[in-house]
Amino acid sequence: MSWNIWGHTLAETEDWIVRNGFPRFRAKQIQDYLYHRYVYDFDEMKQLPGAMREWLKENTVISKPQIINQLQSDDKNTTKLLLKLSDGSLVETVCMHHDYGNSICASTQVGCAMGCVFCASTFDGMKRNLDASEILAQVFAFKQHFDIPVHSIVLMGAGEPLTNYENVLRFIRLCNDPDILNISLRNITLSTCGIVPQIYRLAEEGLPITLAISLHAPNDMIRNQIMPISNSYKIEDVINAARYFYNKTGRRVTFEYILIKDVNASADNANELCRLIGNLNCHINLIPVNGTEHIQLYPPEADEVKKFQMILEKHGRTTTVRKQMGDKIQAACGQLKRRYLKN
């Protein structure tokens, strides 16, 4: 069976090259072609001897996804790709162009098992985990296709990263690898709906990444309505895990809070949220829900959003209201994939 040369560290590629009778330095050349020149045809790797190129073609594959759909917002600030993997699975990834650089939002699973009512990626359930090389390939789909630098990575696409723990941790380390992406760990954000045991486990890894927790409610009663995971992990347990992560890493936690009209966006909800969080050092990211034909939920009016934010800030909470960069191109998780399959 051919070895997939994509998604390996330099040490792993060196080991494989040497075990097959080639000089160690050839591995560095291959890594350079793959991750810095975006050359994925062995015939074009001209620095390698002809005999080695032929051997690579016979014994090696470069498993990269195919871009099958692309959407871009009118202001050019958000681009979404729908990718087909080697087994035919479809995954979405988004590039957001900010003043400080390009941020890639990657998926970690094909589909999602969490069942959050506001997310289109959960409708068909979770098909399988993505391995680290498949997550990495999403980033390089943008780097190759658009020839752009990548400033930061957010694991906020389809899937729950902490239920694909080993592959996600390997992906994070590949992103940080100077021979691959050389992205600072501080520029990587992992978003979870609150898998409490894995938050504690992540805290022990010693990685200075940003942890973003999808909270979306101030109490278990509301959270149970919109996030089935709340039946397994109570909201106070999630907050305690977040506090442990902060104490262990010194990294301020972000709480994601989707605002849904007549569900969780009242002034009382804002005050209750402040009491729940207590003195935990955190940032609260308010996100007016992205309703579609698939998700019959609606954002609060602008003045309601502002009032909610002002209450949090009055209690000393740092907050932002997320800029909606992709609603015009179905950039929320799972929307483009569902439209493609429907058509």
Image: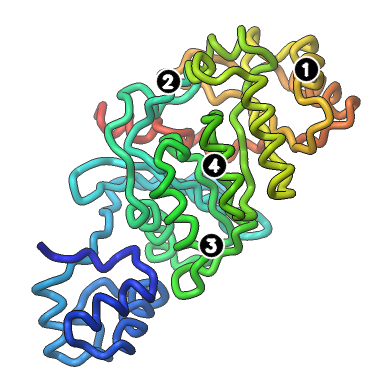
Name the kind of residue labelled 3 in the image.
Val
**As drawn, 261 above or below 5:** above
Of labels 1 and 4, earlier in sequence is 4
Q: For mark 4, what is the residue?
A: 201
| Residue 86 falls left or right of residue 326 | left
How far apart in space, not on screen, are marks 1 and 4 (Cα)?
A: 30 Å
Identify the mark nearer the N-term, 4 or 3.
3
In the displayed structure, 255 sits above or below 151; it is above
Disc assigned to residue 132:
none
Dot 4 falls on a residue whose secondary structure is: helix
Amino acid type assigned to the residue bearing label 4 in the image: Arg
Amino acid beneath label 2: Gly
Residue at the spot of label 1: 270
Q: CA distance from mark 3 to mark 2?
A: 31 Å
Left or right? Give the position of 181 relative to 316.
Answer: left
| Circle 2 residues within 10 Å: few <14, some 14–19, many ≥20 | some
**Which of 84 and 249 lies nearest the eye of the viewer?**
249
The span from disc 1 to disc 2 (Cα, nearest Å) is 24 Å
- Kindly state the secondary structure of the residue where label 2 is placed: loop
Mark 3 and mark 2 lie on one chain; the one further toward the N terminus is 2
Q: Secondary structure at mark 1?
A: helix
Task: Say which residue appears at 71% left-offset and 42% top-offset.
Answer: 246
